[in-house]
Amino acid sequence: MAGGLRLHGRSRGWLYAAGGMLVVSTDSFFVRWSRAEVWDLVFWVSLISLVTYFVTGSRSETMNPIRSWRSFPVPLTAIAVLSTVSQVSYITAVTRTTVSNVVVIVGASPVLVALVGRIFFSERASRRVWTAIFLTFTGMTVIVAGSVGEPNLDGDLLAVAAVLAFSIGVNIWRRWPEMSRIVGLSISAVLSVAVASVFAAPLSLDGRAYLACLGMGVLNPLGRLLHTNAPRYAPAAEVALFTPVETVAASLWAWLAFSEVPEVGTVVGAVIIVAGVLYGTVTARAREL
């Protein structure tokens, strides 16, 4: 019975992780479609996200935000900074390289999540998960190698920075599962608005850009809430294995909306990463059953 409950809980974490990444995958579409400057996007998306978090929190949480922060001041502050760095780096990367390159690099985050968890939080991963991590790292290497010496290399490196911040954040959520997801992500949104306001010209956008900001401001927080809840039920390394859901979906959006056909290296990298995810999760569960 106990083993069955653990499996059920882990499957729930996988579902949250996959669902969260599917929703977040729309970000790259909105960024490209908006044709807006990076800081304008960060400002409006973060501001609208605050409203989304407030509405969601008022329906799902009774915890006092101030009291919640006082209970976990250091990890919640770290989450706010890391989430801000991840979001700004991701949005900027999408404007400087291809969507496919960005999302495939982000899809390789399991290797960093597992390493951070092992080094700083002593969370062990099974041999099967490490094999899956090796596959995702190989896929990321294939993608980045194709951009060495190219003008879009800085975009790829920004995507790597986003992955690093994301990976540390996943482990923090795993280490302190009692922390309020709403409060942590709301603090990040406030910080993003404050930083972006220095560089943004938020009233200079056209209708198309405002619609894109609205779409991101509603969908992105919902995806983040799903994904940050996943580590409550599954190890951080396994949660991160589902980031390739964003890889596949976002590449599809870019192909359908902008006719941005992925390079051969990007496709090869994506196939390797998806194979790693399937090996590390789905086949493992089939063997346990």
Image (spheres, grey):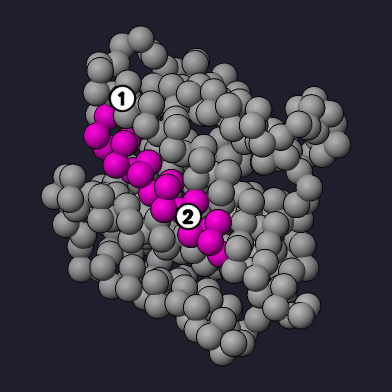
Please report the residue visible at 44 percent of the width from the left and 38 percent of the height from the top: 219
Q: Which quadrant of the figure has residue 41?
A: top left
Q: Which quadrant of the figure has residue 50?
A: top right
Upstream in sequence: badge 1 or badge 2? 2
Tell which residue pokes out farthest to the left in this image. 259
Asked if the magenta segment contains residue 264, the reply would be: no
Q: Nearer the viewer, residue 93 or 204?
A: 204
Residue 164 at least partly seen = no
Q: Is residue 193 above or below residue 175?
A: above
Q: Is residue 77 above or below residue 226?
A: above
Mark 2 surroundings: few (<14), some (14-19) or many (≥20) residues within 10 A: many
Asked if the magenta segment contains residue 22, the reply would be: yes
- Name the residue beneath numbered marker 1: 211
Give the magenta part as a residue range.
Answer: 14-34
- Residue 148 at x, y percent in the picture: 31, 59
Please report the residue visible at 82 percent of the width from the left and 39 percent of the height from the top: 72
Q: Quadrant of the C terminus?
A: bottom right
Tell which residue pokes out farthest to the top in this image. 203
Mark 1 surroundings: few (<14), some (14-19) or many (≥20) residues within 10 A: some
Q: Amino acid at mark 2?
A: Gly
Instruction: Answer left or right for 276 relative to 8.
Output: left
Q: Nearer the viewer, residue 261 or 164?
A: 261
- Residue 83 at x, y percent in the picture: 58, 40
Instruction: Answer left or right for 66 relative to 38.
Output: right
- Residue 138 at x, y percent in the picture: 42, 74
Q: Main secondary structure of the magenta part?
A: helix
The kind of secondary structure element at disc 2 is: helix
Which numbered disc covers residue 25? none
- Name the residue beneath numbered marker 2: 19
